[in-house]
Amino acid sequence: MKIATWNIRGFGAEGKKHMIKSLIKEEMLELIGLVETKHNEVSDWKVQKCWGQSGANYMHVTTVNGSGGLLVSWHQEAFTLHNSFAKERWLCVVGEFHKSGVKCAVCLVYAPNDHQERLIVWDQLRAIKSIIEVPMVLMGDFNEVLSPTERRGGSGASQGMCELQNLF
């Protein structure tokens, strides 16, 4: 199971699609999550261009006021989608990776900067976790760190850190 996530900060430029294609090829990725696509619509053609071949599938969450946007994409020979769930700040695909036989949920998150809004996202993710029956992989931009050592000049655990650590 080879997956990656990238805060792309805009999916439109040809150069970025080329970088995604290179990353997929070099790392032999089976699934990729892109945060901050800044796109209201994503076409089959754009996704196929990133994979460099046909057979790629995807789920997309549109931007909100030109900000955000999520894209989870996979090659159909590597991953089979069984179910999906989405809100404006996260996208969760549930399925099976063929090579490993691993069944799991891969959730791509773009958490808000606002603490109270982040708590809403955490509650939504907990609700999804409670109804799926497979392990969950969380990836994306959480706008929070797990440890003070991840923050420049940080010395102690903040409330936000503790909440992220105790998400599940």
Image (spheres, grey):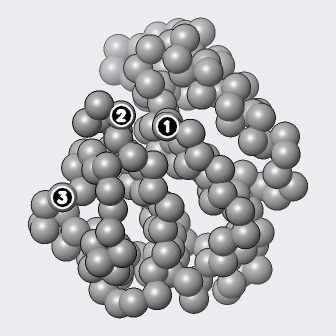
Q: Give the label on residue 64, or none.
A: 2
What is the distance, in whole Å, between disc 1 and disc 3 at their CAs?
A: 20 Å
Name the mark nearer the viewer: 3 or 2.
Answer: 2
Q: Is residue 30 above or below residue 58?
A: below
**For marks 1 and 3 on the same chain, the one whose residue lies earlier in the sequence:** 3
Q: Is mark 3 on a helix, strand or loop?
A: loop
Q: Is residue 121 above or below residue 18?
A: above
Q: Residue 19's image quarter?
A: bottom left
- Label 2 is placed on what type of residue? Val
- Label 3 is placed on what type of residue? Gly
The front one of 22 and 121 is 121
- Label 1 is placed on what type of residue? Glu
Q: Where does the image place residue 119, in percent across and percent down from the top left?
A: 61, 18
Name the residue that disc number 3 marks: 12
Name the residue that disc number 1 marks: 88
Q: Where does the image place residue 57, in percent across and percent down from the top left?
A: 49, 75
The front one of 142 and 75 is 75
The front one of 112 and 39 is 39
Query: How many residues crowd mark 1 within 10 Å: few (<14), some (14–19), many (20+)?
Result: some
Q: What element carries label 2?
A: loop
The residue located at (24%, 56%) in the rendering is 11
